């Protein structure tokens, strides 16, 4: 699939220190230390509805990583999927009378437009589940050769215990794994399974549902193998970073890691598993299934500057769940106006210490709120000093614009 247009990312002088990032697998903040090419896989949308603020926050989080690594001089190989075939898409299409392909195409296009507006740097490879079916088939064959596959009435399952490290991504008790697996698309109670947590690799054709040819019969891929097959195919193992929202740590990233480790015989699948916290509305997780959604496209249509939406997201640390509110958006709009006014001032305090401070805060587990405070202080100093001229810098406004645009993705 094609992704979306890349924003302009100004090059800044010098570079920051190594990025420290929380790793769910290690349950700690750890240094990232990628090679010349940094590899990142972030789970993409299931396109049955428009992009909401939760999705936006997750993609903006990993966009900060992308930008930080680019600033540090890495070539960033970023891959993202689109789950363009899965139960929710078929259920929604059935409900609305839409064609499931047309529904997926339409919502994916809207997502591209939202990501472009939010200045999210596009993935180098943007891959649909449907177009990755040949890769999925080849990885299922590898798992079968490794003795990790069995069938229940023609559907193929992965034996989670084929991976000695199963459980080391999310660190949940058996009881919690079972509960969450049932809530998030799993089928712990299905008769004929060897272990309740074993997950689906290939679903045999169901009447009225789309299906594709395979050596295992006509059918369609399970969810987790889709992402591990795409990541292995494009990035190899280990990837530097597997990202997504915290609702994906289990079962999705746990299962995907186990499948990739068994299929390749090496591990770990990812050096870092990093998860963005959940955005809520009125205290409840914003989700398509709950329907309590604030859409990026609606805000854009109402004339809200996407830079203000991005600032509203960045004013929260990515590891703390937070509520989307009108007040939060209004504060972001005020902040944006204050920053723009300061950048337009004829002379302002110099940008060099600002750049060092913004980089240091981002390197500290993406502390975007602290980075925003640095720019707030610079803007406030500029406002207080308007009229003075000695020791001020007539280029500082332009330099601050470049810093904010390059590292935070906010166009001033
Ligand atoms: N297609 C799968 C991943 S392979 C999927 O989870 N799609 S999704 O459309 O449901 O979510 C897309 C991304 O947004 C995922 O990374 C998910 O973790 C994240 N996400 C979903 N809801 C929220 C929320 N309320 N807050 C933050 N992130 C969210
Ligand atoms: Zn995924």
Image: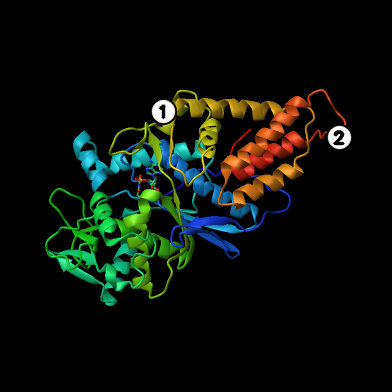
- Which residue is located at x 28 percent, y 76 percent? 145
Query: What is the total number of numbered labels drawn onto the structure image?
Result: 2
Residue 298 badge:
1
State the image coordinates of residue 14 (x, y, percent, origin top left).
73, 53
Q: Of helix, strand and loop, which one carries label 2?
A: loop
State the image coordinates of residue 372 (x, y, percent, origin top left).
61, 38
- Which residue is located at x 45 percent, y 54 percent? 243
- Which residue is located at x 43 percent, y 62 percent? 25
Q: Is residue 111 visible?
A: no
Circle 1 or circle 2, nearest the eye: 2
Q: Of helix, strand and loop, which one carries label 1?
A: helix
Which residue is farthest right? 390
- Image-quadrant location for residue 166: bottom left
Q: Is residue 12 above or below residue 256?
A: above
- Dot 2 crowding, Cα within 10 Å, few <14, some 14–19, many 20+: few
Q: Is residue 198 above or below residue 410?
A: below
Q: Which residue is mark 2?
A: 391
Q: Is residue 372 visible?
A: yes
State the image coordinates of residue 203 (x, y, percent, origin top left).
20, 58
């Amino acid at each position: 699939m094609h992704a979306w247009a890349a924003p302009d990312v100004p090059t800044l002088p010098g570079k920051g220190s190594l990025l420290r990032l929380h790793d769910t697998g290690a349950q700690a903040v750890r240094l990232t230390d990628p090679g010349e090419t940094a590899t990142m896989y972030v789970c993409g949308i299931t396109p049955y509805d428009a992009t909401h603020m939760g999705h936006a926050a997750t993609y903006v989080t990993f966009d900060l990583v992308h930008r930080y690594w680019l600033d540090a001089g890495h070539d960033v190989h970023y891959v993202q999927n689109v789950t363009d075939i899965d139960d929710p898409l078929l259920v929604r299409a059935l409900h609305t009378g839409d064609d499931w392909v047309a529904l997926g195409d339409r919502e994916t296009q809207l997502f591209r437009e939202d990501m472009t507006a939010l200045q999210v740097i596009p993935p180098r490879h943007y891959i649909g589940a449907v177009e990755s079916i040949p890769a999925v088939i080849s990885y299922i064959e590898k798992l079968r050769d490794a003795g990790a596959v069995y069938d229940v009435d023609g559907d193929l399952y992965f034996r989670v215990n084929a991976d000695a490290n199963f459980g080391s991504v999310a660190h949940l008790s058996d009881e919690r794994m079972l509960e969450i697996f049932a809530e998030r698309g799993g089928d712990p109670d299905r008769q004929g399974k060897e272990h309740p947590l074993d997950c689906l690799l290939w679903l045999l054709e169901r009447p009225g549902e789309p299906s594709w040819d395979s050596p295992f019969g006509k059918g369609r891929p399970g969810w987790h193998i889709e992402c591990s097959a795409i990541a292995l195919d494009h990035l190899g193992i280990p990837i530097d970073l597997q990202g997504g929202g915290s609702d994906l740590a289990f079962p999705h990233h746990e299962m995907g890691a186990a499948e990739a480790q068994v299929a390749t015989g090496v591990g770990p699948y990812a050096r870092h598993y990093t998860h963005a916290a959940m955005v809520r509305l009125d205290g409840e997780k914003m989700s398509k299934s709950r329907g309590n959604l604030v859409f990026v496209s609606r805000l854009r249509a109402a004339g809200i500057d996407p830079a203000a939406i991005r600032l509203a997201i960045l004013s929260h640390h990515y590891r703390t769940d937070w509520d989307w509110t009108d007040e939060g958006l209004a504060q972001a709009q005020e902040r944006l106006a204050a920053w723009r006014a300061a950048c337009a001032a004829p002379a302002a305090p110099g940008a060099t210490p600002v750049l060092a401070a913004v980089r240091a805060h981002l390197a500290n587990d993406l502390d975007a709120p602290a980075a925003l405070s640095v720019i707030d202080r610079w803007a406030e100093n500029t406002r207080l000093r308007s009229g003075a001229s000695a020791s001020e810098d007539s280029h500082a406004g332009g330099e601050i614009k470049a810093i904010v645009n390059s590292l935070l993705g906010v166009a001033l």
